[in-house]
Image (tube, grey):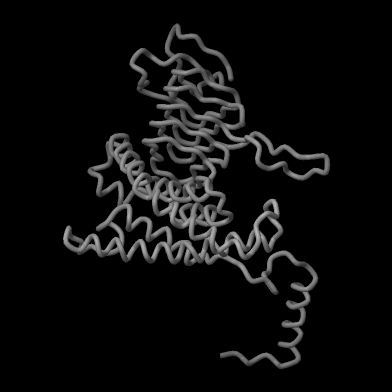
Amino acid sequence: MGAAMSHPELDSFVAAMAQSYAGDPRGHRLNRRYMPSKAVVAEIVELCLEVFFPGYFGRQDLTDENLTEHLRGLFDELHARLAVQIEQCLCHAIEEGEGDGSRAYADCAEYTAKLSGRLLARLPALRAMLLDDMQAALEGDPAAHGLDEVILAYPGFLAVAVHRVAHELYEMGVPLMPRMMSEWAHSVTGCDIHPGAKIGHRFFVDHATGTVVGETSVIGDGVKLYQGVTLGALSHPRDASGRVIRNVRRHPTVEDDVTIYANATVLGGTTIVGRGSVIGGSVFVTKSVAPASLVSRGERGHSSRPLPATGSPASPDGDAVPGAPEFDI
């Protein structure tokens, strides 16, 4: 081992770091009380996965005989951890001066119990949605050999499962925790779905790496995204002081039964991808696309044309169909 630092040297380092904290209130939580735990929020996600898919996550010795008692234990643990973390999030928002100022610290505990109960009551409905998502993954990927593989090995499905829970909390008005959940999923799967995004039934993200779905995105039923797809914002509107204006629609709408292939980018709060359309790989879309259109990338740049009558083009990246109407987008 090297020689230990001298006391004067150590004292100087400590004093310089303490001065850094004192000189700027950002990036530290000194003299503050409320903060949710990243580790516990991750445990809440994992407990939800155990509830959704018994035998796949957590215990693997479950039977009809021991399932009820097992679920009692899971729900008790979930409720207890949710209550603490939701209270921390609500009180953190008060401590930071966020919200409309109508809630006091004393209200957090009572409100927390209601929110925790509301989420637990929603878990069966969320599971039903996830079963449809799971089936969509199996039917949408010929490489999938069964539902077990989808649950255990598909990062896109895991990201969607976490999103279903995070979105519920987001809709309930719980601050911070939904984003912590989605970023846990992002770190594990490479798929970044903001908890504010509204996503319909039978949603499938294939491969998942690099896929980004922005906060105000609206996605219909039966939508399939591939790796690297971005549903993003064209620009961030700012007020007269140059600050970003929040809580405005910035991200696109993707209607039912749309497929968006790898590395395509769709931007803008007024952009609508019409029902049944296909967006080819590496396409950059900033204007609305009519229903049942194929948008592809060819020698002349991007083009859009009606899909063949079958509605399932063989090659979303291929050349234009001879005689089909085409226009730049």
Residue lying at 37% horizontally and 21% vertically, measured from the top left: 313
**Front residue of this view, candidates 103 and 200:** 103
Residue lying at 58% horizontally and 26% vertically, measured from the top left: 271
In the image as oriented, which residue stretches furthest toward the top? 323
Q: Which percent across, then down, holds residue 311?
A: 36, 18
**Front residue of this view, candidates 15 and 253:** 253
Give the total number of marks visible in the rendering.
Answer: 0
Q: Which percent across, then down, holds residue 206?
A: 38, 40
Q: Which percent across, then down, holds residue 40?
A: 47, 66
Compared to residue 166, the image places residue 264 above or below, namely above
Q: Which percent across, then down, holds residue 88?
A: 57, 64
Examine the image and state in which quarter residue 224 appears. Answer: top left
Horizontal side, residue 175 vs residue 150: left or right: right
Q: Quadrant of the N terminus?
A: bottom right
Residue lying at 32% horizontally and 58% vertically, measured from the top left: 50
Q: Quadrant of the C terminus?
A: top right
Residue lying at 77% horizontally and 45% vertically, measured from the top left: 243
Examine the image and state in which quarter residue 97 appears. Answer: bottom right
In the image as oriented, which residue stretches furthest toward the right? 241
Horizontal side, residue 79 vs residue 285: left or right: left
